[in-house]
Image (tube, helix red, strand yellow):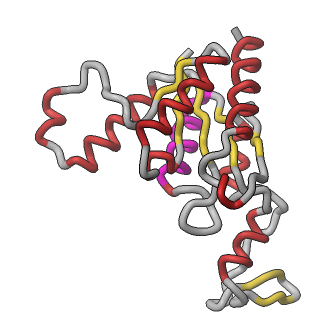
């Protein structure tokens, strides 16, 4: 069973090695991991004339459509929340009505990460925490924005979190391994 591996892993210094490591974990659990970096079989020839960014977006959507489920690396990326592209892919798979599972190497709740990101520029009011522009900080005791957590849970998926040392933030795969194992079990139960 093919599963799409969403996440900011494509931005790592060694994205192909990372994809190979993620795919190896999937294989151990009887799944076939599909990376956004994988070539697309039968890519339409007219895509060659498109800008690279457009080709990547179309290729990723085609990969997602070809998979039975999605596993998202939701480790905060360049801010307090998950990578924006990954979040789109979570929503895309959710709209297809297929399972979405997520994992993160940051155990803090979204509200706590947002306050830390604002670095003292948040204040507590009667209505809740507000940023420097008087905008309310989301605080539902969730791992990320309510729509991300909501999409994962509504799809029948689950979220897995690890708390590795700082140097393991992008290399520790324990939460990913737990996520893959749970998805493999869930797919087996559905099949």
Q: Is residue 53 left or right of residue 122?
A: left
| Residue visible at 45% across and 22% down in the picture | 66
- Dominant secondary structure (helix, strand or loop) of the stretch shown in magenta: helix
| Residue visible at 46% across and 51% down in the picture | 12
- Residue closer to the observer: 110 or 140: 110
Q: Is residue 69 left or right of residue 136?
A: left
Question: Was residue 125 drawn as part of the magenta stretch in this picture?
Answer: no
Q: Quadrant of residue 65?
A: top left
Where in the figure is residue 104, as x and y percent of width and height? 69, 49
Q: Is residue 105 left or right of residue 70?
A: right
Q: What is the residue that sits farthest to the right in this orientation?
A: 126
Write down the region rendered in magenta: 85-98
| Residue visible at 84% across and 89% down in the picture | 125
| Residue visible at 32% across and 38% down in the picture | 58
Where in the figure is residue 77, as x and y percent of width and height? 56, 60
Q: Quadrant of residue 185?
A: top right
Where in the figure is residue 94, as x and y percent of width and height? 60, 37
- Residue closer to the observer: 7 or 18: 18
């Amino acid at each position: 069973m093919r599963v799409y591996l969403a996440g900011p892993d494509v931005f790592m210094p060694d994205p192909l090695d990372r994809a190979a490591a993620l795919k190896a974990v999937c294989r151990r659990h009887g799944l076939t991991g599909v990376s956004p970096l994988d070539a697309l079989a039968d890519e339409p020839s007219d895509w060659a004339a498109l800008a690279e960014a457009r080709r990547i977006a179309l290729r990723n959507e085609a990969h997602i459509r070809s998979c039975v489920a999605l596993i998202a690396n939701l480790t905060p990326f360049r801010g307090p929340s998950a990578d924006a592209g990954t979040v789109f892919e979570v929503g895309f798979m959710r709209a297809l009505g297929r399972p979405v599972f997520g994992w993160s190497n940051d155990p803090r709740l979204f509200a706590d990460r947002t306050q830390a990101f604002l670095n003292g520029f948040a204040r507590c009011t009667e209505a809740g925490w507000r940023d420097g522009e008087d905008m309310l900080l989301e605080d539902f005791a969730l791992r990320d924005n309510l729509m991300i957590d909501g999409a994962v849970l509504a799809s029948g998926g689950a979220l897995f979190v690890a708390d590795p040392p700082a140097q393991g933030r992008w290399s520790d795969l324990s939460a990913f391994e737990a996520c893959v194992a749970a998805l493999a079990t869930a797919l087996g139960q559905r099949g």
